Image (spheres, helix red, strand yellow):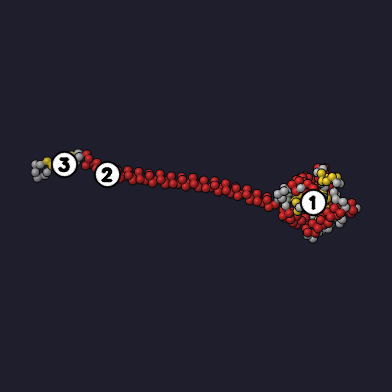
């Protein structure tokens, strides 16, 4: 690129020119710098984006792992709660769960005035059965008896537990002594119907004895220990009378509506 100009005082023509490379030098230099900055910025942006994506993926993975761990812990806690509340041999609720349930139902009976019945159950001559048939067979026998008793307590609120050893118990909310007698007799009949051989001398099948006690608005028992004591006394009476029977505590009114008339 060139240019010229005439001088004012002399007959001279002054000409000047720049080559293409000289003209584009500054522009090229600026362009290269800008390009480098853009490339660097893109690289930084790409690196930051990859780091963000990686962090998000790691967070998602951590959240999934935490969710799985939480689910596993929940299942483990549920399993521990089940082990803490149920008897491992019979599958019934254990003594701890029975105490909690009876305490809750007794308090509800006191508030509402609705009857609450308790049935204490004992497998007749179970020690002799163990001695004759062995402990594994004895465990099987308890399992079968537990199934029969649980089948007799059919309502959603009815509660069956292993009280200890060969003793079991039924808690029957909103059930008077007459209703509890029906449920108890059903349980006794179901065990008898299984015809589990006990001994041959004398020949007899496995049977259960049951004692029934009831907390009602009329008797207003002061605490659940009194209810347990009455059911245990009735069970003792059933065993003393020959076993394989149901006895209601002698202070219970089986049919109060008939007595009142």
Kind of element beneath mark 2:
helix
**Helix, strand or loop status at disc 3:** strand
Q: x, y percentage for residue 161?
A: 75, 51
Decide if residue 72 is on the left or right side of residue 41. right
State whether residue 106 appears in this view.
yes
Q: Which residue lies under the disc numbered 2? A: 29
Residue at which label 3 appears: 16
First reached walking from the N terminus: tag 1 or tag 3: 3
Residue at x-position 29% and y-position 43%: 32
Secondary structure state at the residue bearing disc 1 = helix
Q: Mark 1 or mark 2: name the one nearer the start of the chain.
A: 2
* Inter-mark Cα distance, 3 to 2: 24 Å
In this view, the mark in front (1 or 3): 1
Q: Residues within 10 Å of mark 2 (few under 14, many from 20)?
A: few
**What residue is at 16 percent from the left and 41 percent from the top?**
16
> Residue 48: x, y in percent?
42, 47
Q: What residue is shown with label 1? A: 127
């Amino acid at each position: 690129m060139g240019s010229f100009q005439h001088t004012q005082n002399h007959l001279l023509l002054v000409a000047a020119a720049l080559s293409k490379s000289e003209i584009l030098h500054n522009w090229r230099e600026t362009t290269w710098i800008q390009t480098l900055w853009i490339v660097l910025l893109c690289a930084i942006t790409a690196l930051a984006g990859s780091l963000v994506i990686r962090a998000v993926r790691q967070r998602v993975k951590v959240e999934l792992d935490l969710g799985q761990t939480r689910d596993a812990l929940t299942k483990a806690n549920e399993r521990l709660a089940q082990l803490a509340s149920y008897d491992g041999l019979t599958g019934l609720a254990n003594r701890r769960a029975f105490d909690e349930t009876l305490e809750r139902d007794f308090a509800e009976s006191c508030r509402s005035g609705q009857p609450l019945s308790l049935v204490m159950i004992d497998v007749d001559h179970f020690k002799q059965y163990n001695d004759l048939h062995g402990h594994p067979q004895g465990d099987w026998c308890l399992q079968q008896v537990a199934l029969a008793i649980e089948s007799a307590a059919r309502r959603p609120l009815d509660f069956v537990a292993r009280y200890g050893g060969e003793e079991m118990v039924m808690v029957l909310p909103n059930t008077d002594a007459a209703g509890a007698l029906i449920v108890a007799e059903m349980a006794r009949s179901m065990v008898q119907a299984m015809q589990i051989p006990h001994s041959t001398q004398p020949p007899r099948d496995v049977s259960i004895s049951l004692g029934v006690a009831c907390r009602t608005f009329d008797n207003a028992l002061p605490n659940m220990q009194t209810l347990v004591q009455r059911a245990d006394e009735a069970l003792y009476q059933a065993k003393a009378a020959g076993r394989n029977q149901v006895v209601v505590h002698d202070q219970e009114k089986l049919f109060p509506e008939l007595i009142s008339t």
